[in-house]
Amino acid sequence: MKQFMDQDFLLKNDAAKTLYHDYAKEMPIYDFHNHLSAKAILDDIQFKNITQVWLGGDHYKWRALRTNGINEQDITGDTSDYEKFLLWAKIMPYLIGNPLYHWTHLELQRYFDIYDQLNEDTAEMIWNKCNEKLQTKEFTVRNLIKMMNIKVLCTTDDPVDNLENHIEIAKENLDFKVLPTFRPDKAIHIEKPDFHKYIKSLSEVVGYEINDYQLLEKALLERLEFFHKNGTRVSDHALDEVLYAPATGKEVNDIFQKALRDEELSLIELKKYKGYLVTQLGKAYAKRGWVMQIHIGALRNNSSRMFKELGPDTGFDSINDEVCAKDLSKLLDNMDKTNELPKTILYCLNPRDNEVLTTMLGNFQGGGIAGKIQFGSGWWFNDQKDGMERQLEALAQLGLLSRFVGMLTDSRSFLSFPRHEYFRRILCNKFGKYVEDGEYPNNIQFLGKVVQDICFNNAVNYFDIQISSIMNE
Ligand SMILES: O=C[C@H](O)[C@@H](O)[C@@H](O)[C@H](O)C(=O)O
């Protein structure tokens, strides 16, 4: 029987072990999509205890606790931090098969050098050991980032953000980059109740009233330029349903005016507005060499009661079963036909769409960039072992896995970076199995280089982000 999460965790053959230990393990991390706080990095904050960093904002953990019958008060309410930690420790043995079980123990091992199982019996000891370390200078947020050899972090930011924290961080000579991501969802989701409020806040930022579509586009392009000047090279879109229909600027403005009058929009009007705006933004990204990320297929905020109480991204989302292929194809083609499709990373939340996306990739490749259109790493409900294996398999069989830009955490916790290790072990095991099964020659040196490319080098080449100054060559 294998030892529990030992050094060869997830590595089931000799080739896999060699690929991980000799090639993947020491590679730096390029986390090009997460929800970390740039202010926490600027202030280099110190967490008071393990509850604050583990349970403070991670809706994965909140969801697991709710499923275990824990009251909301003890999850996101004002129950003491120790009580919340104790509940998390108690649930741990019941998380068998859930990635949170592996991630929690990897984080204890990598950050705190704790190899004990977390459960009710070890809770107090682990609470004390973690908190003792968290209060030392070695455990400030910036040192947590350095501990994991992270070189690039792209946070998630709204066009109205003033980026003051990123701007201040950039003035310091850090050995990692913290860059904003342009996330214009609130301008795209015209049907949302807060659309008016958002247009007002965008108007305040640009200094003129946005009273038609053309001014909205102008304002967004001005903010895009501001983000570009402050280091942004990545955008992100949550297109829970991909909507596209051909439209003229006049039609889109008529739709915009209808929305301002609070009139309900038809599906075809949503398709026209969203397809047109995403196309215009995509062309602007292409002009600047940016990468466009598109996250497809979430069904969000299913509990209206809890949305009212806690807001979005609090663990009440699930997988959508809307089909995305046709409108996605038209949306991408609408940019590609004038050769203005940017580098694009597609993520689907419904694994049923894995093959839809990996076959879609091949339709729009080229332009002198290997792997211009990418299939993103197992996203959200797919970022566990099987989900990652399915994503890698679909990309290997129908795309080009060796050109994959690799893993990202998409996380809100500064302790989540062992997820890259988790991914690397899964990747090395996959490649190792090809070799051990005689399906690929034992070219370990070449495969090791491909593994290192997927871990880091492909991202360096794919994103137009200069990092030579922070790479201690
Ligand atoms: O892995 C979970 C993710 O952080 C999830 O919360 C985000 O992907 C969010 O839905 C988004 O739209 O960016």
Image (tube, helix red, strand yellow):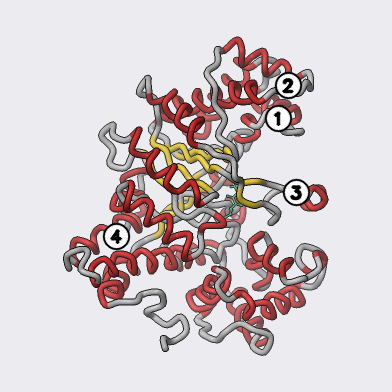
Residue shown at the point (35%, 58%) measured from the top left: 455
Q: Secondary structure at mark 1?
A: loop
Amino acid marked by disc 3: Gly
Q: Which residue was labeled with disc 4? A: 452
Which dot marks residue 191? 1
Label 1 and label 2: CA atoms lie apart by 8 Å
Give percent across and percent down for residue 171.
Answer: 49, 46
Badge 4: residue crowd in 10 Å (few <14, some 14–19, many ≥20): many
Which numbered disc, 4 or 2, marks the residue closer to the eye? 2
Give percent across and percent down for residue 90.
Answer: 69, 80
Q: Earlier in the sequence, mark 1 or mark 4?
A: 1
Residue 85 lies in what quarter of the image? bottom right
Q: Earlier in the sequence, mark 3 or mark 2?
A: 2
Quarter of the image for the N terminus: give it.
bottom left
Q: Secondary structure at mark 3?
A: loop
Amino acid marked by disc 4: Gln
Q: Earlier in the sequence, mark 4 or mark 2?
A: 2
Amino acid marked by disc 2: Ala
Q: Check contact, mark 1 vs mark 2: CB within 8 A.
A: yes
Q: Is residue 184 visible?
A: yes
Quarter of the image for the C terminus: give it.
bottom left
Label 4 and label 2: CA atoms lie apart by 49 Å
Query: Does 31 sit left or right of 251 as displayed?
Result: left
Label 1 and label 4: CA atoms lie apart by 43 Å
Which dot marks residue 259? 2
Pick the front one: 291 or 222: 291
Give percent across and percent down for residue 282.
Answer: 47, 28
